[in-house]
Image: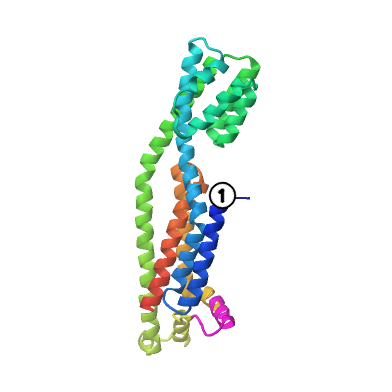
Amino acid sequence: MEILGVKIEKKHYIGFSLGGTLLIVDVVSYFGSLWFFPGIILSIIVGLFPILSDYFNNVKLQNIYEIAFLDFVRNLVGAVKSGMPISAAIIDASKNNYGPLTPHVHKLAHQVEWSIPIHKALLNFANSIGNRIIERAISTVIEAEMAGGNIEDVLDSITKSLISIKEIKMKRDSSVHSQVVQSYVIFVIFLGVMIVIQNLLIPYISSLSTSGAVDEFGDLGGGSSQATIDFGKRVEIDYSSLPAFVTSIVKWIVSFQTMFMMLALFQGFFSGLVLGQLATGSAKQGIKHSFILTLIAFLAITISQAIMG
């Protein structure tokens, strides 16, 4: 079983168990208090932390693989240019250190030494890493090797291609970094505006309408005052019993006051995906930003509602 490309292991089940335990403690100890909803979020964070941590570490590891693979291909080119066949070049290049990629290179060299066909060994090498860029490069080498092409020219072309991809990524990262910071600042300002409108402006307008102050400006059709009262009405969570709690939660979700939270959560989630698309070319890698922004939004709005409400 995999989630976000991460194979579920024992440590992930431990994280799920700890998250569930914290959720039970939160319900038992803080049900009806200010920290009940933040406690739920904390439980979710603890439960998902191991799998999210592995996912983000895997993304980082793939970037390291790409850089190390470039060094590996360079060493292959040098060995092939010296007159070595591709099999001997792989074995010779495997003597160098490539960081996290080293075990995969050693495995490739051992397979070549055991007389496994080059194309099959390279295919196993690419599949064990699971990187799209490396898979494409290996695919090109396999096709050239099976077609009897000039491996030296193919490897040289792959090296130039990898260098170009690396330079493009570095330029994109440097240009997007400021935009990422700017997006976070804009989102925090957006949250501040939502909190002020929801917890200060709307209750103030509601109090004016209740006291009859709206009538000083004229009653539009005789119904504007009542509409404003409904506009600013708050739905309180009923903690007296489980059925009452569920019913009040449903009313709270569809109420006007929750609209601000939903706006903030949607804004944070999709902003994170956009940042991931801009920074890495993959919206999937924006899950990190989506998680952080939605977490900030939920905690800020729930705590502000509890304190200012």
Residue 273 visible in rendering: no
**Residue at point 52%, 15% (across, down):** 152
Q: Nearer the viewer, residue 60 or 236?
A: 60
Asked if residue 244 lies in the magenta stretch, the reply is yes
Which residue: 48% across, 72% down?
26
226 relative to 274, above or below: below
Q: How many marks?
A: 1
Image location of residue 166, percent across then percent down: 43, 32
Q: Position of residue 289 (x, y in %)?
A: 44, 53
Q: For residue 177: magenta?
A: no
Q: Residue at x 54, y 58 (%)?
A: 14
Which amino acid type is marked by label 1? Leu
In this picture, residue 204 sits left or right of residue 286: left
Local packing at callout 1 (Cα closer than 10 Å; few below 14, some 14-19, many 20+) is: some
Provide residue 201's location: percent of width, then percent of height. Answer: 36, 76
User: Would you name the residue on which mark 1 appears?
Assistant: 4
Q: Is residue 232 above or below residue 45?
A: below
What percent of the width, then of the height, locates residue 157?
A: 50, 21
